[in-house]
Image: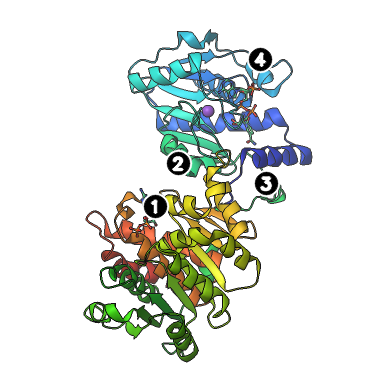
């Protein structure tokens, strides 16, 4: 399986390259695309009666004319409704000329119980919000409750961003071509797609590669080879040592969640660095995790020099006050070279927003590898200018932030995006709303740290951690709270190591 996600522009480029290389031409690709949709309709909805095919003016509509012809040729009941005729001389006009089904105006479309809708109005070429007869068709379809098979994308969903600027069809199945698009995985688009089938219409892997697409669907298949397993002669420190900074007396749980997750994700040793005032609270709840007093930078540096941890986690359960951000800046400055990587999460990010100029300046100089794990709110605080640019998709925002902070960004949510400063990115698709529970983000920070401590490169470690976190939640199932996640990782780690 291929995991690249192509924007509509990249898909059009792959299309051009394929046609340029021959022998198939544009209308040939369209016939294959329509054929793939007709196969899905016939195999999944054999008793649909009739099938209403809705065609737009572009190539998405062109695919629809092919579907209508093939369904008619197979003996099925088909009606075809169009917004307007395709442009003369276009591939879609050729497909329409080959289609024997009478064309009715979209305003006459009224789906009945037992029918099926094939949505071939707009796909990659969506250029404005749905309106007029098209929006009315969306509403009538929803009212009738009939299933929709979407061609390429549910009309109204942006393939680039997943945004739905007006209304959009809600499909039971979306059949797309060659590769998924970001809009299939980013919300709200994802909620409109239903099951996604990727049909092979003869676009070669070489044509996809030549587009330079650098975003992928997150999947173990492409990072599993880098997933760590302990060497036969490993000792606890060589397996990877993670240090996690704890909050004060009333906020120690977050660091412990992160620490437990780091241990379950394979770190050989994990130390919680606790303010003196919170030592007793931490001590009462830690067993295999090491506990050490840390009341400031001097203590932290002494720990780094003595224990040489590979990775630090800073943020869970701290406070949004500026001194928390200043401490992280000092760690990245004075203590740089004493540890390999830093995971900045939660209050570590919020507090950094108060000194963002110094932060971005520091990131332009050399420093430790950095992974930032903001949720939507934290992202907006640290990257306020990027968040304010509504022309950007979530993917584009994460990439812009990664370049600006010279860091791997894990932009969390139901459609977590992982982005690297070199332009690579991944969109996660195994998320579950079970993760929407307090403390689950703290767990994620510990997994990222543990994988980096075991020498997994930051981008791949972040991708693996996001996938493992969701997989653990899925396996545990309903009733999950953050405390359950570290132990639930055991099976996930076993599956990846096997
Ligand atoms: N390799 C591949 O991927 C293959 C792709 N194929 C297919 O091609 C599709 C892309 O085709 P496409 O580029 O012609 O764009 P498409 O989505 O038909 O829309 C463009 C037209 O719609 C109009 N329009 C847009 N939004 C509108 C709105 N809200 N309300 C009203 N009008 C709106 C827009 O108008 P304009 O913006 O110009 O004013 C323009 O006229 C792709 O999704 C796939 O199905 C296959 O055939 C085979 C191989
Ligand atoms: N609806 C959802 N679907 C999938 N994942 C989700 C959903 N809601 C939250 N998550 C995930 O749960 C985690 C929550 O992290 P965060 O908001 O930092 O929580 P906390 O601060 O309570 O630890 C993130 O990894 C996020 O991607
Ligand atoms: K469509």
Name the quadrant of the C terminus: bottom left
Q: Earlier in the sequence, mark 2 or mark 1?
A: 2
What label sits on residue 204 in the rendered view? 3
Q: Residue at x 46, y 61 (%)?
A: 349
Q: Earlier in the sequence, mark 4 or mark 3?
A: 4
Q: Earlier in the sequence, mark 3 or mark 1?
A: 3
- Looking at the image, can residue 33 be seen? yes
Asked if the residue at tag 2 contacts the one at tag 4, i.e. Cβ–Cβ closer than 8 Å, the answer is no
Measured Cα–Cα span from mark 2 to mark 1: 12 Å
Discs 3/2, front: 2
How many other residues sit within 10 Å of disc 3, few (<14), some (14-19) or many (≥20)? some
Q: Position of residue 177 (x, y in %)?
A: 58, 38
Determine the image quadrant of residue 487.
Answer: bottom left
Determine the image quadrant of residue 364.
Answer: bottom right
Q: Position of residue 393 (x, y in %)?
A: 55, 43
Q: Residue at x 44, y 82 (%)?
A: 300
Discs 3/1, front: 1
Viewer-closest of 50 and 362: 362
Asked if the residue at tag 2 contacts the one at tag 3, i.e. Cβ–Cβ closer than 8 Å, the answer is no
Residue at image mark 2: 187
What label sits on residue 431 in the rendered view? 1
What label sits on residue 249 in the rendered view? none
Measured Cα–Cα span from mark 4 to mark 2: 37 Å
Q: Earlier in the sequence, mark 4 or mark 2?
A: 4
Q: Position of residue 154 (x, y in %)?
A: 49, 30
Q: Residue at x 52, y 75 (%)?
A: 330
Residue at image mark 4: 97
């Amino acid at each position: 399986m291929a995991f690249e996600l192509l924007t509509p522009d990249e898909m059009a480029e792959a299309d051009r390259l394929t046609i340029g290389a021959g022998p198939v031409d544009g209308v040939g690709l369209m016939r294959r695309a329509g054929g793939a949709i007709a196969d899905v309709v016939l195999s999944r909805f054999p008793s649909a009666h009739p099938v209403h095919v809705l065609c737009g003016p572009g190539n998405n509509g062109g695919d629809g004319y092919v579907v209508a012809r093939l369904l008619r040729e197979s003996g099925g009941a088909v009606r075809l409704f169009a917004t307007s005729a395709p442009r003369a001389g276009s591939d879609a006009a050729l497909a329409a000329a080959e289609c024997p089904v009478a064309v009715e105006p979209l305003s006459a479309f009224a789906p009945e119980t037992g029918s099926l809708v094939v949505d071939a109005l707009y796909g990659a070429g969506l250029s404005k919000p749905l309106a007029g007869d098209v929006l009315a068709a969306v509403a009538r379809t929803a009212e009738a409750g009939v299933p929709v098979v979407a061609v390429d994308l549910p009309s109204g969903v942006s393939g680039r961003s997943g945004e739905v600027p007006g209304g959009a069809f809600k499909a039971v199945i979306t059949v797309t071509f060659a590769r998924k698009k970001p809009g299939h995985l980013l919300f709200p688009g994802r909620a409109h797609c239903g099951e996604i089938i990727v049909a092979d219409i003869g676009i070669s892997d070489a044509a996809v590669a030549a587009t330079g697409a650098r975003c992928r669907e997150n999947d173990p298949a492409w990072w599993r080879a880098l997933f760590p397993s302990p060497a036969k002669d490993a000792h606890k420190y060589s397996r990877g040592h993670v240090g996690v900074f704890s909050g004060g007396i009333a906020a120690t749980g977050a660091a412990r969640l992160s620490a437990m997750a780091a241990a379950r994700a394979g770190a050989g040793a994990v130390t919680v660095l606790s303010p003196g005032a919170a030592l007793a609270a931490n001590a009462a709840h830690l067993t295999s995790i090491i506990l050490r007093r840390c009341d400031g930078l001097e203590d932290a540096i002494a720990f780094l020099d003595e224990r040489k941890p590979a990775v630090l986690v800073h943020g869970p359960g701290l406070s949004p006050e500026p001194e928390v951000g200043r401490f992280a800046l000092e760690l990245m400055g004075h203590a740089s070279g004493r540890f390999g990587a830093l995971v900045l999460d939660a209050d570590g990010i919020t507090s950094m927003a108060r000194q963002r100029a110094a932060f971005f300046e520091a990131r332009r100089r050399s420093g430790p590898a950095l992974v930032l794990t903001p949720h939507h709110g934290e992202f907006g605080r640290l990257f306020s200018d990027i968040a304010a640019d509504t022309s950007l998709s979530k993917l584009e925002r994460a990439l812009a932030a990664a370049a600006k902070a010279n860091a791997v960004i894990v932009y969390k949510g139901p459609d977590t995006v992982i982005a690297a400063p070199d332009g690579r990115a991944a969109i996660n698709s195994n998320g579950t709303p079970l993760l929407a529970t307090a403390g689950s983000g703290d767990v994620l920070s510990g997994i990222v740290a543990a994988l980096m401590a075991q020498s997994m490169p930051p981008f791949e470690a972040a991708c693996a951690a996001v996938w493992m976190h969701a997989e653990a939640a899925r396996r545990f199932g309903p009733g999950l709270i953050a405390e359950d996640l570290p132990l639930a990782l055991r099976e996930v780690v076993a599956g990846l190591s096997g």
